[in-house]
Image (cartoon, rainbow, N blue to C red):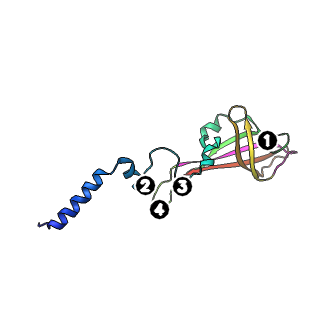
Amino acid sequence: MTVSRRNFLRKSSMIALAATLPLSLSTLGSGQQQGGPPPGVPPAAQRNPLYNFTRSTFASYVNSVFIVNSVPLAEIVLVEVKETPLVVDRMANRTPVGECFTLVFRGPAQTRFKQNTYRLEHASLGQFELFLGPTDRPDNEHQYYTAVINRRL
């Protein structure tokens, strides 16, 4: 097999160039991450305490009270934390990374509020904003609300 001088120089130059790239630049170029937030997450979202809460964070506070600061005298109780499975994207031929889960809260039937983003306060978790939507459940004594946390990458 004969290799021309031109092809030899071209290929060795490419190999030498690739060997001199810093590791961080090569992982960035290949689409890999080295810690930190995923690309495209705004700084304001990263400052929200909810950014660091996981499903297990909320699971330890089931049956505890959350105060809805935007609604007068509204207290809701976290009654369920459900994991939502990550679905494989067959078109992109990849398995998604991250987590997705649903929080279900229960409040009194007489204090109902609309779907919106509310500032919640919890004795241990502090204050954070969460998008809540009313959920229909067969219960005349309570109103249920759902929040979906979707962190698929």
Q: Which residue is mark 2?
A: 31
Q: Examine the image and state in which quarter residue 59 appears.
A: top right
Marks 4 and 1: in contact by CB < 8 Å? no
| Rendered residue at 55%/54% (across/down) | 40
Viewer-nearest residue: 123 or 40: 40
The residue lying at 74 percent from left, 41 percent from top is 120
Task: Give whichever of discs 4 and 3 has the lower sequence position.
Answer: 3
Q: Is residue 97 above or below residue 11?
A: above
Q: Determine which residue is flagged by label 4.
A: 92
- Answer with mark 2 or mark 1, whichever residue precedes in sequence: 2
User: Alpha carbon of mark 4 to alpha carbon of mark 3: how far?
Assistant: 12 Å
* Depth order, front residue of 68/139: 68
89 in the magenta segment: no
Q: Mark 3 = which residue?
A: 87
Residue sitting at 26 percent across and 59 percent down?
14
Q: Are marks 4 and 2 in contact (CB under 8 Å)?
A: no
Image check: 128 left or right of 72? left
In the rendered image, which residue does mark 1 sit on?
A: 69
Mark 3 and mark 2 lie on one chain; the one further toward the N terminus is 2
Relative to 59, does residue 90 appear above or below in the rendering? below
